[in-house]
Image (tube, rainbow, N blue to C red):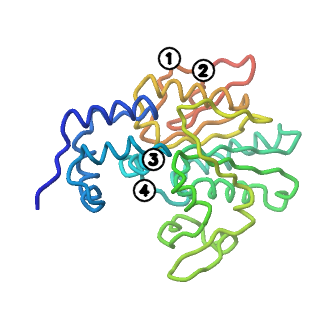
Amino acid sequence: MTTIKLSDADFKRLSTFIIEKYGINLTQKKTLVEGRLANSIKQRGFDDFTSFINMIFADRTGTEMINLLNKLTTNHTFFLREKEHYDFMKDIALPHFEKTKKDHKISVWSAACSSGEEPYTNVMALLEYFGHKSSAWNISVDATDISMRVMNKAKEAIYHADSMKNLPETWKRKYFIKQENDCFKVSDEVTKRVTFKTFNLMDKVPYRAYPYDIIFCRNVMIYFEHDTKIEVVKRLYDVLVPGGYLFIGHAESITRDTTQYQFIKPAIYRKPLPGEPTKK
């Protein structure tokens, strides 16, 4: 079977558009792009990359481009991923907010939320922390991604048991409803607190009535070039409440001389309170 090859010219026009529009740097990943797309191109009836890329650029809805990006950047995700973040929330972040938030509002942003496991985990972690006091707190999670396809899956809130292996059994019993084929649906108690929106991290963050207390932006900035990452980190900083926390992926880092965040520990950063030093 003949393998479809990606020419340098086609790769350049595709990668240039993606980095300019989405900030995702694929310029050194030609082999990855070719490998991940070749089979699907054939399955869709295209004989070469040129005609396939022409089709993507001709799609004014942008759906084809987003689907392509999903194939190139999607990470495997699951519930309670990077549990250390949730331990930190329980032990440090949430006790701070419980003492200082007089309005009893906790607002979380799950950026690049993919198929929904992260934002739903966020709600469950908050409900577990506040326990019987949960009804007295306004708990909300905004979940954003550039892909409507993964957002639709997230809104369905149905997951296979494999993605739930890290969850405590008590969480599974409290927050999931058994379905067919070893699948489970997230309960309304959780889903009603999550709002899904399509959003490109390269764009200006929409205005909110109040800033976020906690932002999760994990395992997405690894695809950004240096300058783009600095811009995105600044946008996140601007919509984070003073004293709020940013969680990034453990394979990611923020250059300390380009940010005002306090470094707390690997993959955890804090926006200082007024008068506090930016370095810690």
Q: Residues within 10 Å of mark 4 (few under 14, many from 20)?
A: few
Q: Which one is in front in this view, the residue at disc 2 or the one at disc 3? A: 3
- First in sequence, mark 4 or 3: give its number: 3
**What residue is drawn where x is 20% and y is 54%?**
47
Q: Is residue 89 left or right of residue 98?
A: left
Residue pushed farthest left?
Answer: 1
Q: Given contact means CB atoms under 8 Å apart, are the residues at marks 1 and 4 in contact?
A: no
Q: Which one is in front in this view, the residue at disc 4 or the one at disc 2? A: 4
Task: Report which residue position mark 4 lands on.
Answer: 76
- First in sequence, mark 1 or 4: give its number: 4
CA separation, marks 3 and 1? 33 Å
Q: Is residue 52 left or right of residue 114?
A: left
Give the residue type at disc 2. Gln
Q: Which mark is residue 257?
A: 1
Task: Report which residue position mark 2 lands on.
Answer: 260
Task: Report which residue position mark 3 lands on.
Answer: 66
Q: Which one is in front in this view, the residue at disc 1 or the one at disc 4? A: 4
- Picture coordinates of residue 143, whole percent (x, y): 63, 49
Q: Element at badge 4?
A: loop
